[in-house]
């Protein structure tokens, strides 16, 4: 059973996408609900708000512990930020769940392209490119050696943001049982990213 962290953000959309993939998915708001699931999805939303609510709902430590023990996790956008080891341009008191040996830059794409869509080739996803929706999205600024980069956004998409010496900005990554995307597949009806996560659990 997959839990979707249900403190804030686009919880319903993830529950619907997982159900459409044939997975059993339930909202998680309490430690007892977390204890009952085998994997977790961290939705898009606002990472600083989610971080605060994780503390209030006494889920921060148990969730950190489960992820450290190897529970599979998938985070989209704000969820990716929560899974990162470190956040640039975050709030000073923002808490990290960890699980991904990456440094992410929050709101990385800058004002001009706060929100945009593009077609992305994602490793592990067969067929047409994935239509990727970015909403005040992060990118991965630095990734450890165990992190697989599954997709990058070319720097030409990144108008007016960053210094851009890299060949592209990683926006989908995987490390072991942890998957993260800077974009929101839960908003497009394309189930292939959720399916990739569900396949990782098999
Ligand atoms: N900018 C948001 C944050 O810092 C993430 C946006 C999103 O999840 N669409 O958490």
Image (cartoon, rainbow, N blue to C red):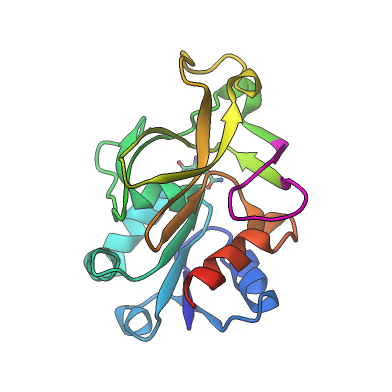
Residue extending furthest toward the right: 128
Indicate yes or no whether the magenta region holds residue 124. Answer: yes
* Above or below for 109 versus 175: above
- Say which residue appears at 65% left-offset and 34% top-offset: 115
Q: In front: 84, or 148?
A: 148
Q: Percent from the top left, x then y, of residue 23?
A: 59, 81
Query: Chief secondary structure of the magenta span?
Result: loop
Q: Percent from the top left, x then y, of residue 124?
A: 59, 55
Q: Percent from the top left, x then y, of residue 117?
A: 72, 37
Residue 126 image-quadrant placement: bottom right
Side of 170 relative to 84 (left or right): right
* Above or below for 1 versus 145: below
Say how many tags the image has: 0
- Say which residue appears at 25% left-offset and 42% top-offset: 93
Side of 175 relative to 152 (left or right): left
- Say which residue appears at 65% left-offset and 55% top-offset: 125
Q: In front: 105, or 176?
A: 176
Q: Percent from the top left, x then y, of residue 175?
A: 38, 53
The stretch of residues the image draws in magenta is 117-130
Indicate yes or no whether the magenta region holds residue 35. Answer: no
Side of 39 relative to 103 (left or right): right
């Amino acid at each position: 059973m997959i839990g979707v962290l249900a403190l804030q953000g686009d919880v319903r959309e993830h529950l619907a996408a997982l159900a459409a993939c044939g997975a059993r998915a339930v909202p998680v708001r309490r430690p007892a609900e977390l204890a009952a699931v085998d994997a977790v999805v961290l939705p898009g939303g606002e990472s600083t708000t989610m971080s605060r609510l994780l503390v209030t709902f006494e889920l921060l430590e148990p969730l950190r512990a489960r992820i450290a023990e190897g529970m599979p996790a998938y985070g989209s956008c704000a969820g990716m930020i929560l899974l990162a080891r470190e956040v640039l341009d975050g709030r000073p008191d923002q808490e990290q769940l960890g699980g991904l040996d990456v440094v992410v830059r929050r709101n990385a794409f800058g004002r001009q392209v706060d929100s945009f869509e593009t077609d992305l080739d994602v490793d592990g996803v067969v067929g047409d490119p994935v239509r990727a929706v970015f909403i005040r999205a992060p990118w991965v600024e630095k990734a450890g050696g165990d992190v697989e980069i599954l997709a990058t956004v070319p720097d030409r998409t990144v108008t007016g943001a960053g210094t851009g010496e890299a060949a592209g900005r990683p926006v989908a990554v995987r490390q072991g049982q942890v998957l993260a995307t800077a974009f929101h597949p839960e908003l497009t009806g394309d189930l292939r990213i959720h399916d990739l996560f569900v396949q990782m659990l098999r």
